[in-house]
Image (tube, grey):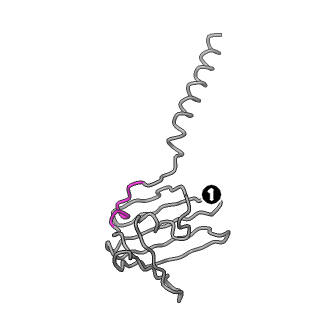
Amino acid sequence: MKRASLSRFSLFAVGALTAAAAPAAWQPAHAPALPALAGIEKGMWELRERGSSAALRRICVADAFALIQIRHGGTACSRFVIDSKPDRATVHYTCPGAGHGRTTIRLESSRLIQIDSQGIADNSPFNVTYEGRRLGNCG
């Protein structure tokens, strides 16, 4: 009888610890500190897609995290940091009902960046590479 009580207690304790730890382990990374993104100047940026003759894209960057979700701009997404270095950040993000992506931003300077992003948007795969240059302040 004593052994059965101990077993139940052990199972209860393991279950309680697992339940307590689970929320911390599964919370999305909303805005973790990423040194590479902190090094990007705010302002008007021009993005040129490599290997494409498409028109240049201009974007006002108030928060460098907008560059992570270049194909899912303005969508509420959860983020998971894969790699973070002073000159590079790789983030996977998931946007419920809108798709997901994995983006790497490499800082050449505070005004020149390289963006590689791939994932699913509008039910179709995408794989894009941009060179971003800061033009000035947002107007």
Which residue is depicted at the point 48% across and 84% down?
Answer: 56
Magenta segment includes 9:
no
Which stretch is magenta? 32-39
Residue 22 place in picture, x, y as percent: 54, 39
Quarter of the image with the N terminus is: top right
Quarter of the image with the C terminus is: bottom left
The answer to whether 52 appears left or right of 86 in the picture is right
Which residue is depicted at the point 46% across and 82% down?
Answer: 48
Few, some or many residues within 10 Å of mark 1 (<14, 14–19, 20+): few
Q: Residue furthest top?
A: 1
**Rendered view: 61 above or below 50:** above
* Count of numbered circles on the image: 1
Magenta segment includes 36:
yes
Amino acid type, label 1: Pro
Label 1: which secondary element: loop
The answer to whether 98 appears left or right of 92 in the picture is right
**Rendered view: 49 above or below 12:** below
Q: Residue furthest front?
A: 139
Residue 103 place in picture, x, y as percent: 49, 67
Tell me where residue 26 sits by quadrant.
Answer: top right
Residue 38 place in picture, x, y as percent: 34, 62
Which residue is depicted at the point 62% across and 63% down?
Answer: 99
The answer to whether 124 appears left or right of 17 in the picture is right
Where is mark 1, residue-wise?
96
Q: Residue furthest bottom?
A: 53
Which residue is depicted at the point 48% across and 66% down?
Answer: 68
Asked whether 96 or 42 is in front, the reply is 42
